[in-house]
Amino acid sequence: MMKDRFKLVPAVALILEKEGKLLLQRRCNTGFCDDCYGLIGGGVDGNETILQAAIREAKEEAGITIKPEDLNVLHVLHHKYKDNIESITFFIEVTEWQGEPTICEPQKCSDLGWFEIDNLPENLVSHLRQTLENIAKGKIYSEWGWE
């Protein structure tokens, strides 16, 4: 009999930048970091690659179209939440996209906008500021929530 293996929850977070600004959305009604700003993204579905998930989430959440060749994984974050759920998030740079980002899931997003990278909102998703700092330093891996 095989022992059940431990499972991580995979996720993607998209880094869209233009003119020194970062695209962020304010979460609502999700049960995770509501009223905080985060990147476009979400969980990876079964039978879906990381890049496929990024493309799907971009369309579902922001109404934009991206191609696999316009994606670049910049960072991987292994994090643990209060309820001991562990997740691994792939932070993916989007170098080009088609369409103007808009709120496509108003039941989960109360604001969407471009924010100066050097002046991001105080109410960011818990791990995002540290992750962006690590990306700026060229680090490709970090951990969060293991205290």
Image (tube, grey):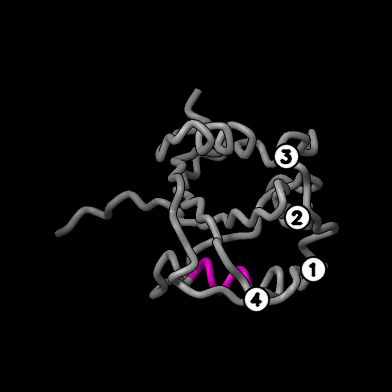
On screen, 87 above or below 128?
below
The N terminus sits in image quarter: bottom left
Would you say the magenta stretch is mainly helix, strand or loop? Answer: helix
The kind of secondary structure element at disc 3 is: loop
| Circle 2: residue type | Gln
State the CA–CA distance, disc 1 to disc 4.
15 Å
140 left or right of 130?
left
Disc 2 vs disc 1: Cβ atoms closer than 8 Å?
yes
Q: Is residue 57 magenta?
A: yes
Q: Which mark is residue 135?
A: none
Separation (CA) of disc 4 from disc 3:
26 Å
Read off the residue under disc 4. Answer: 98
Q: Which residue is mark 1?
A: 103
Q: For the residues marked 3 and 1, what is the alpha-carbon distance in whole angstroms?
A: 18 Å
- Between disc 4 and disc 2, whose residue precedes? 2
Q: CA distance from mark 2 to mark 1?
A: 8 Å
Q: Residues within 10 Å of mark 1 (few under 14, many from 20)?
A: some
